[in-house]
Image (spheres, helix red, strand yellow):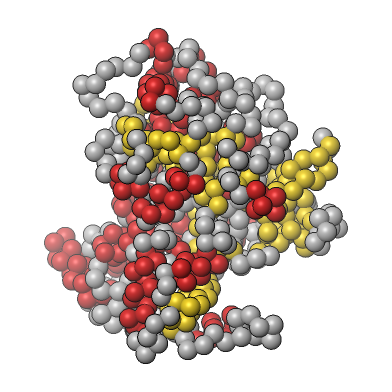
Amino acid sequence: MDTHARTQPSTPAAHPTGVHHLIGQHARQHPGAPAVREAVTGRELSYGDLWDLAGDLAARLTDAGLRPGDACGIALDRGAHLVVAVLAAARAGAFYVPLDLDAPAQRSAAQLADAAARFVVTASGDGRAAAVAPDLPRIEAVRTAGTAAPDHGRTGHDAGGHDAGGDDPLYVNFTSGTSGRPKAVLVPHRAVLRLVDEPTYCTLRPGTRVANVANPAFDATTFEIWATLAARGTVVVMPSVAATGLDRWLDLLRAEGVAAMFLTTSLFHMIAQERPGALGTLETLLVGGEALSPEAARRVLAAGGPDRLVNVYGPTETTTFATYHDLDAEKLRDLVRAPIGGAIQHTELRVLGPDLAPVPDGDRGELAIGGPGVALGYLGRPELTAERFTTLPDAAGDGVFYRTGDLVRRLPDGSLEIFGRLDRQVKIRGFRVELEEVERAAVATGLATAAVVEKTGEGAAAVLVGFVLPAGDRHAPARTVTELQTALAGELPGYMLPTRWTVLDAIPLGPTGKADRDALLALDRPDTPDTPAAASASDAASAPSASDAASVSDAPDPGDGPAPQDGDPATEVRRLWREVLEVAEARDEDNFIEAGGNSILAIQLAGRVNEAVSADLGPADVLLATDLADLTEKVLHSATARR
């Protein structure tokens, strides 16, 4: 396996080298302590149950031919089975490749191929794994009823599993890549041990209930599962807000006694605007993924917010979080930009100039991150690994630092302030997107000779817009866009698909001969009806890896939210549609996604409509409505049924 791994300083000697051994210790010493709970089903696993089920799966994978150092795909939604599967992979000495089951099957299949996965762990009766890995053996995460019970002599609490080394890989997460091919970030045990070792960014103790809300394929899951289990806490698996609606989701959060949680910045901003007092039951709330609005934080704290509100930052390549900044009313008083703070435990930060030499405090430079949290590199991509992972002198001699591409400066109090990117990477609702990957995918369809993609808007209203030079009939722009969208939807996840395209006769060029992006953005017309949408209802999935690099600019400050109205329901729906989507017109034939909507805005619109007209509308109703007329009909029916 050509990982081109770089040796890092070891984690504190008090810890075993494999993170799974920590869970084994809890299973031996506290077998009855609650480890996992599914909030919707009520299913629970104790540490003893979890350890036994993971041991059984590890044994079955090993018997089937999985060996230490092999890759094992995981095609599971959030749930107890997912926690069993990741622990089993670690105990077998393998590294796991969690899949985004809402992404196109072809993309997931390519990720499994890149990682050279040997098996795929799936749930009983779930056919999605067959679609992404038709040629790989599939192993059920948990034996179905009536099959042989675990052999406790082999899988019991004393069987620790593979004795992993600190640099042995634990999992792979994929991030967007400029070449058109996602990058496989290979994360070792020592990096996760650094994340969970007495975390400075979050107070975790035995019994702490931590929400699991992230997509399994994204690295916030690393905190939610491994940090919780390492502290002998309880992983509380939550449904997506888009599936339940905001108020029901918040009720469930309170009912489950969740004490700590990570939220993407976009979702936090929306809650701050709609229900600012709803997070007051939390002990610790971590927020990350994009630039945090100080006004949103002020609103939440003023409404009796969590005991601890923390702005966190960290690329996937540095294992979920690298910096943190505690926010309180005093710190927020005069802030216009929220700092990303200082280093979490066992982490070193450098602000570098173009020559990789440190810049003076107060000057802007590229942020480089070192310490045991730095990943091994990009699986099978030695040139790219060498470009982004560099050796710099540190206290221990020479250490590997990850060059983030983020522009920062160090403030007088030592914390870091972030300003943007040195490249064309952007964030869309917490998702990291290389614009060049989308452009290359568009040209690769054969339907375009050139494509330019840009981000417009901020926060939950941020979208991608595209400009295309068609390869075929330039006199049929609507057909070009429709065919292009259809082709891209089979290649890219929903968050990477432009909301609208503009078909061009020529790409305007700037003085250097490159595409004039400002001129292109001036051509973008959001209210043009003949611009089919690129996103789909799959965008309603939970937002992932919100802990990646912060977005290029500040998120907009949220307003005061809507006041309940007593007007005609149809009129209210139309008014709220314009308000949430920030559009001047609302036509009966308008589609929510085509108009710039997404899962966050669907949650917002559903909540506001329910409040205004006493309906029972869910975010899925908004996302799946054919058009505004269809949505209005659903609202009228719901409001009538509730009277």
Residue in the picture at 47% in, 51% down: 544
Q: Residue 248 versus residue 547: which sits nearer the camera?
A: 547
Q: Is residue 259 above or below residue 555?
A: above
Q: Is residue 236 above or below residue 598?
A: above
Number of on-image labels? 0
Let me know if residue 172 appears in the view. Answer: yes
Percent across and percent down for residue 193 are 61, 32
Residue in the picture at 61% in, 67% down: 424
Residue in the picture at 34% in, 35% down: 137
Q: Residue 578 versus residue 398: which sits nearer the camera?
A: 398
Percent across and percent down for residue 625 are 25, 67
Q: Residue 249 versus residue 238: which sits nearer the camera?
A: 238
Position of 119 with respect to 631 (left or right) is right
Q: Is residue 477 above or below residue 19?
A: below
Residue in the picture at 61% in, 83% down: 516
Quadrant where the C terminus sits is bottom left
Image quadrant in which you'd find residue 55:
top left
Percent across and percent down for residue 642 are 16, 60
Position of 402 with respect to 316 (left or right) is right
Quadrant where the N terminus sits is top right
As drawn, which residue projects farthest toward the top? 153
Q: Residue 590 versus residue 117: which sits nearer the camera?
A: 117
Percent across and percent down for residue 220 are 51, 45
Let me know if residue 579 appears in the view. Answer: no
Q: Is residue 239 above or below residue 151?
A: below
